[in-house]
């Protein structure tokens, strides 16, 4: 091989090396299909790609240099093809894992929930009672013997204190076993202990009893407790407040019926039934606050009078919304809940 032919072959080798280096740089920076296609045209394009130009140079080499030149050219061509393939795979898998984004599409509409019917009932009761001048207050769900029973004149041997009728949290032998409150009447005591009359309060919250769940019972339910302490209060005021409440909440002219009953903390005591749509339903208990309770909280029973009532929130909500089974409120079935 002449010196001239050897120099031309060396120049050819240098050009092929530069071509491969450039292809590697360009393809490493390619981030999408379009960049790879541009690189393919630049390096391997059939008409004006750089490999095509190198092939033309190969044709001009000295016959003695051609076998080596051909080998170098095939190597470079295979290297560019491999670089293209690797880049293609990298970009393809990245694009597959990313969902295509069409920014002109409207956003995903998230389903919007609404208040649970029991929460809504609680707010409505608070609002109605607020208009009648009753301030909304809260009390703890974990209670002691004093607030759940003793101050309410429920004696130690009263069946309401039976361990089978309550969720006690500490051992029964403990001096003052705590329990999940079984009624919201506890809040009457807490408020009267900390404030002086006159009082108009309403308290809505959860209470717990080991009752078997059925259409009208649930082991966890809500009560609304009302307490009014004002001079000259009578049962007539109690009935008027309950009737005004029932008419506002249920709508229309709701009749309220009192049936004689017994609660240790009211005297006289009554069961409260409401008639609506031709049916009477028991909603709760009520009565004049017993003098023993007034004395327990430090009031003078000869001077202070008042009434109290406690209604089942699930019962009044069921009545209001025409629900036959209060268990439906807690089944978490959105098809049921969506209706309200
Ligand atoms: C009481 O709990 C008294 N504290 C009510 C009271 C307050 C009387 C103030 C006098 C003065 P009773 O145990 O009857 O009373 O419950 C009241 C209401 O709670 C019932 O009428 C009923 O509507 C509701 N209730 C009782 N147990 C359940 C239960 N397991 N599931 C759903 N609601 C219930």
Image (cartoon, rainbow, N blue to C red):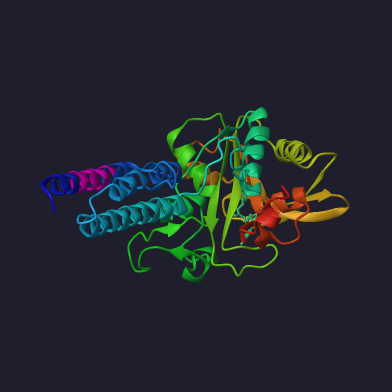
Q: Main secondary structure of the magenta part?
A: helix
Q: Quadrant of the N terminus?
A: bottom left
Vertical placement of residue 175 versus 113, above or below? below
| Position in image of residue 17 (x %, y %) | 21, 47
On the image, the x and y values in percent for residue 282 come to 74, 55
One can see residue 307 in this view = yes
In this rendering, position of residue 248 left or right of residue 142: right
- Quadrant containing ligand 1: bottom right
Point out the residue furthest to the left here: 3
**Image position of 252 (left or right of 139):** right
Describe residue 300's horizontal placement relative to residue 75 as left or right.
right
Check residue 301 for magenta coloring. Answer: no
What is the number of callouts on the image? Answer: 0
Q: Going by the image, does 77 lie left or right of 148?
A: left
The residue closer to the viewer here, 259 or 268, is 259
> In the image, residue 38 lies at what x, y percent?
42, 41
Report the residue at 20% width, 54% height from top: 65
- Tell me what residue is drawn at x 29 percent, y 45 percent: 57
The residue shown at (67%, 68%) is: 214
Pick whichever, 203 or 175, lies toward us.
Answer: 203
Which of 268/229 is in front? 229
| Stretch in magenta | 11-22
Where is residue 22 drawn, in percent x and y? 26, 42
């Amino acid at each position: 091989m002449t010196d001239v032919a050897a120099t031309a072959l060396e120049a050819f080798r240098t050009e092929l090396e530069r071509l491969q280096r450039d292809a590697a740089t360009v393809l490493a920076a390619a981030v999408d299909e379009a960049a790879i296609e541009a690189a393919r045209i630049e390096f391997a394009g059939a008409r004006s790609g750089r490999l095509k130009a190198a092939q033309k140079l190969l044709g001009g080499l000295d016959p003695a240099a051609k076998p080596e030149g051909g080998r170098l050219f095939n190597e470079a061509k295979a290297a560019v093809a491999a670089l293209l393939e690797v880049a293609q795979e990298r970009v393809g898998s990245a694009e597959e894992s990313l969902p295509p984004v069409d920014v002109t599409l409207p956003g995903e509409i998230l389903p919007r929930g609404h208040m649970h019917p029991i929460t809504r009932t609680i707010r409505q009761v608070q609002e109605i009672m607020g208009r009648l001048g009753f301030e909304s207050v809260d009390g703890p769900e974990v209670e002691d013997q004093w607030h759940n029973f003793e101050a309410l004149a429920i004696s130690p041997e009263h069946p309401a204190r039976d361990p089978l009728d309550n969720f006690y949290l500490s051992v029964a032998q403990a001096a003052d076993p705590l329990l999940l409150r079984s009624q919201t009447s506890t809040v009457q005591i807490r408020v009267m202990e900390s404030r002086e009359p006159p009082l108009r309060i309403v308290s809505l919250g959860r209470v717990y009893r080991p009752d078997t769940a059925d259409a009208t019972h649930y082991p966890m339910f809500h009560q609304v407790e009302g307490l009014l302490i004002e001079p000259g209060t009578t049962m007539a005021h109690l009935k008027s407040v309950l009737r005004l409440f029932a008419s506002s909440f249920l709508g229309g002219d709701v009749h309220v019926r009192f049936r004689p009953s017994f609660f240790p903390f009211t005297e006289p005591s009554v069961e409260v039934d409401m008639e609506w749509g031709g049916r009477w339903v028991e909603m709760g208990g009520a009565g004049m606050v017993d003098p023993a309770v007034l004395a327990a909280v430090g009031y003078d029973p000869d001077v202070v009078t008042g009434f109290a009532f406690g209604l089942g929130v699930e019962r009044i909500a069921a009545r209001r919304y025409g629900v036959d089974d209060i268990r439906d409120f807690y089944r978490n079935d959105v098809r049921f809940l969506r209706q309200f």
